[in-house]
Amino acid sequence: MAQIPPSLQDLVNRFNQVQAQLQNVLLRKQQYEAELREIEKALTEIEKLPQDAKIYKSVGNFLIPQNRDAALQELRERKELLELHTKTLARQESLLREQIEKLREEINKELSRLKGSVETAKGGG
Amino acid sequence: MSRQDVQRLLEEYQVINELLATLQAQHTTVSELLEELTTALDGVRLLKTEGGERLVHIGAGLFVLGTFNAREVLTPLGAGYHAFLDLENAERILKERIDEYSKVKTSLEENIEKLIERAAQIRQVLERLGIK
């Protein structure tokens, strides 16, 4: 079995590392987006309610009474924060995808170079 | 077919089976959720029908006789918030949730179907090559 050259091994390691980072970013982004959808749903429903509506917030095993305005404010703040996180993660995602593409190209170049040198060696033999 | 191709097929088969297990677990969860939502919807509709006594299941096949005059139910709105809603709105929210999860369930079923097909194709190829 031919030994993988250190230069190629290094590229492959970096590729795997960036790939893992991307998976992590995508997972977090997905979680934030799911929470955002949930918040938007709650906002839509609470906005329809009258000012004196009886609203409760789930805190562990308890349901704590909360007024409509406080609930709306809390949800809007959380929504803003999540949107910020999502944008940051989207930027990270595109940067990581670019890195992956560059590394893929470098790996392919390295493989072509190796293939060429192996064939040259065979031809010379 | 080279040894590398066979190796690749075996790897793909393994990945497909792992993915199938994950999707089937998700399908079970979504199905249970849908069942729960449907039960809740039936309950809300039952409350809407006027008067009369109801037999209410309290677990382990035990029922109690009771009358209800609830015109509102404490309904989950999402993100950990609940509010007392009239029965019409509670029913609407439940229907929306059911619709949402039904779409997820259908999508999961389509993906599971595709993966099962692909796994069967690979299995046929491997069996032809005498690999069990």
Image (cartoon, coloured by chain):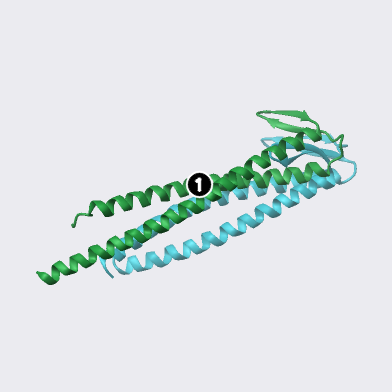
Decide if residue A80 is on the left or right side of residue B17: right
Residue B82 spot, x, y in % from top left? 75, 37
Please give the letter of the chain rendered in cyan.
Answer: B
Relative depth, front residue between B51 and A92? A92
Residue receiving disc 1: A25
At 45% across and 56% down in the image, what residue appears?
A98
Q: Nearer the viewer, residue A35 or A120?
A: A120
Residue B63 falls in image quadrant: top right
Residue B21 in the image, given as x and y percentages of width and height: 47, 51
Percent coordinates x, y for residue B29 in the rendering: 58, 47
**Which residue extends farthest left?**
A125
Q: Which image quarter is the C terminus of chain B in?
A: bottom left
Image coordinates of residue A48 in percent, x first then y, are: 83, 44
Left or right? Give the position of B52 relative to B102: right
Judge by depth and name the residue closer to the eye, B44 or A118.
A118
Occupied quadrant, residue B50: top right
Q: Nearer the viewer, residue A79 or B124?
A: A79
* Drawing shade for chain A: green
**Badge 1: few (under 14), some or many (20 or more) residues near its Cα, within 10 Å?**
some
Secondary structure beneath disc 1?
Answer: helix
State whether residue B5 is above or below residue A36: below
Hey, what amino acid is under mark 1? Val
Q: Residue at x 33, y 66 (%)?
A: B127
Please tell me whether residue B2 is drawn above or below residue B91 in the rendered image. below
